[in-house]
Amino acid sequence: MPLDQFVLFGDSITQQSFSQSPATGSFAFGAALADAYARKLDVVNRGLSGYCTVQAYRALPLCIPEPEAVRMRFLLVFFGANDARIAGSPGGPDQTVPLAEYKSNLRHIIEHPAVQVHEGVKIILVTTPPIDERKALRADQEKYPTLAMQRVLRRTAANTALYAQAARDLGEELGVPVLDIWSAMVARAGHSRHDPITPGSMEAPVNDTLQSYLHDGLHFTGEGYKVLYGELMALIERTWPEEMPARLRMKLPAWDNGKTWVKPKADDVSGEGTLRASGVFEAVVHDVQKLDRWE
C-alpha cells in the first residue's frame, strides 16, 4: 500500500527546496519535510522553475497523483514570484500575469477537479515571498550581460507585496489556510506590510536579516527555507494538529519493536521460515522474505 502524498506544487523556490547547493546552505526545506514525515507521508517535489500560474494551471493534471493510485493528503501551492515580474522587463520571455488574473488562476488551481477529487485534501496556499531589490538587480545583471549597464528592476518589492496580499485575500475568501511567508520574513527583519516604504526596496535601508533569507534577492537561502519550514509546521499544528509528524503512525513498525515482530519458531517448516508480525499498525505485513539471520 503506497503512502499518502504531501505534494509541493510551486515554481523554482519549490523546485530548489531539496537542493544542497552552496546557495541554499546546509538546510533544505523539502528534505527536512520528507525526513519529518518519513514512513508516514511521501513528500513529492513538483516545483516547476520559471512557471507562472498560467503555466501551472495547464501543467497541474500532470503533477497531481491519480486518486486510484495514491491519496494526496496535503497540497502546498506556492506561485507568484514569476507572475509578479514587471511587464515588459528585459531578460527572457515575459512571465508577468496581471494581479487579478493571478488571483483567479490560484482559485482555479485550488478548485481544479484533479485536486478536489482527493477527498479531504488539505490545501495550503503560500504567499509570494518578499524580494530584495539590491540583490535581485545584481543577480539579474550577472545572469543577463545585456543588463550589466542598466539599472532595470525585473521585480520590485512593492509590486511583489501586492501579489502576496492577493494570495491572503483569496485564502480568506475560500477558507484555505495561508502560509504568509512574506509577512513571516519581513517581521523577522523588523518590519511589516504597513510600513510606508516596502521592505526590500531600494528606498528602504539595507536590511541584513531580509537579505540573509534571499541569496539572489528572490530565491531562498538555507535560512530562508528554515523560516518556511517553521511557518509550515506552525500552520499544521494550528490547523490540523492530528497531522503533525509526531502524531502520525508509521506505515511500517520499527525494526526493534518487540511487541510487533515475532521470531519464527525453529520447528516451523510450514511457513517456510517467514517472518510474522503482530500488533496494531497501519500497514499489513504479508510474505516477508525469509531472513538469513535473525538477531
Image: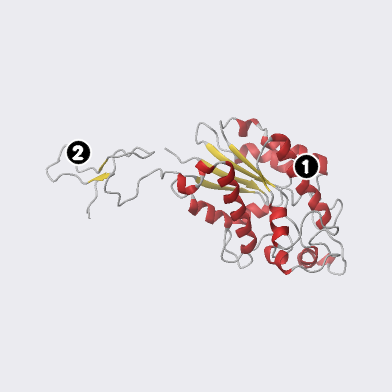
Q: Position of residue 12 (x, y in %)?
A: 67, 54
Residue located 63% across and 52% down the image: 14
Residue 29 shows in the view: yes
**Residue 271 image label:** 2
Residue identified by numbered label 1: 102
Number of residue marks:
2
213 up-or-down from 114: above or below: below
Q: Relative to residue 280, is residue 132 depicted above or below? A: below
Can the viewer see residue 155 in this picture?
no
Regarding mark 2 in the picture, which secondary structure is present there? loop
User: Where the N terminus falls, by quadrant?
Assistant: top left
Foreground residue among 95 and 294: 294
Q: Where is residue 135, by image quadrant? A: bottom right
Q: Identify the mark nearer the N-term, 1 or 2.
A: 1
Horizontal side, residue 95 vs residue 24: left or right: right
Q: Residues within 10 Å of mark 2 (few under 14, many from 20)?
A: few
Tag 1, which secondary structure?
helix
